[in-house]
Image: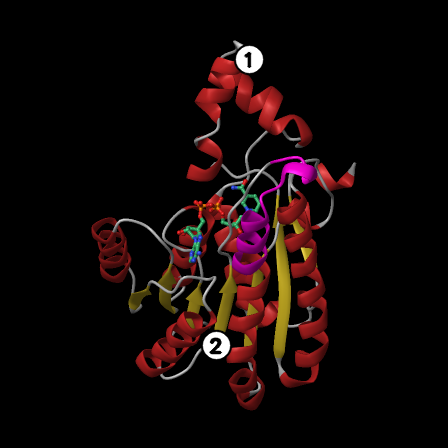
Amino acid sequence: MLKGKSAVVTGSTSGIGLGMAEALAGAGVNVMLNGLGDPDEIEKTRAELDGKYDAKVLFHGADMTKPDQIEDMIETARREFGQIDIMVNNAGIQHVAPVEEFPVEKWDAIVAIILSSAFHCSRLVFGEMKQRGWGRIINLASAHGLVASPYKSAYVSAKHGMLGLTKTLALEGAEHGVTVNAICPGYVLTPLVEAQIPDTAKARGISEEEVKRNVILEAQPTKEFVTTEQIGAMTVFLCRDEAAQINGASLPMDGGWTAK
Ligand code: NAD
């Protein structure tokens, strides 16, 4: 059903974005990977996906804080694939600090990478999607798009903003076959989260298992991490025709966190 369609997935050199890109490639969708990292590692990942699936997998290193680089990424994907049918806005970073100490440059970077890049990518693909009468925009938000935690002012604000963008564009695309939805995961065991475990264990004098269960997953009722495969499967489902009436939704995948 999705075979031959094309997608751009921002922030897909690791973690959730890579899981979404792999699921789309597995469904036969050509994918433009994007993100930062070691060029040799990225090329290895790209070549692996390209060889494993019946889909063309390319890479563009646009920095999501730079609108001109974002434009170049979209133009390159359009040139290489012929068209862009699916836009996945996933790139993101985190910074944790009390608001009175929050570095201004971190605020600017987080808002740019999470929220403004989703606006730029969406505005650059929306016209062609409307014209063809089919399109999917999937914004990878967070449980922190729905509820807050202290010391994450920029991240929580940007993720809440992403849900506003999702709803607005959903209304703009509704009569043109373009759906716009947000996935709101709880904790996913990606490099971003894994990196915090050993230090937290040491700082609290508890085991890494206890950190996962009682510290990180404290808010997540199932006490289990969401997996990148589960998010990948949701992404593919949202692209299918069966999901055509899911529009403007913020879909929690958080083990019940935001049900509390
Ligand atoms: P990650 O660090 O593994 O991946 C982040 C990706 O974004 C990487 O590919 C990185 O290179 C890319 N990126 C960062 N800055 C960039 C920039 N300036 N330009 C282009 N790419 C850039 O982290 P992850 O956990 O996979 O996070 C992916 C998304 O999921 C983020 O938006 C994050 O907020 C969100 N999220 C993560 C969790 C979690 O528990 N891990 C939960 C909810 C939401």
Local crowd at mark 1 within 10 Å, few (<14), some, or many (≥20)? few
Q: Secondary structure at mark 1?
A: helix
Task: Assign the magenta stretch its main secondary structure.
Answer: helix
Q: Which residues are magenta?
A: 97-113
Left or right: residue 15 versus residue 131 is left
**Count of numbered badges drawn on the protein:** 2
Residue on which disc 1 sits: 204
Residue 80 coordinates in the image, percent (x, y)? 31, 79
Residue on which disc 2 sits: 85
Inspect the magenta stretch and tell me whether residue 42 lies in it. no
- Pick out the residue farthest to the right: 260
Regarding residue 127, the answer to whether it shows in the image is: yes
Question: Which image quarter is the C terminus in?
Answer: top right
Residue 94 coordinates in the image, percent (x, y)? 54, 43
Regarding residue 190, the answer to whether it shows in the image is: no
Q: Amino acid at mark 2?
A: Asp
Rounded to the nearest whole Å, what is the CA distance between mark 2 and mark 1?
A: 47 Å
Local crowd at mark 2 within 10 Å, few (<14), some, or many (≥20)? many
Residue mark closest to the camera, 2 vs 1: 1
The residue carrying mark 1 has its beta carbon less than 8 Å from ligand 1: no
Inspect the magenta stretch and tell me whether residue 101 lies in it. yes
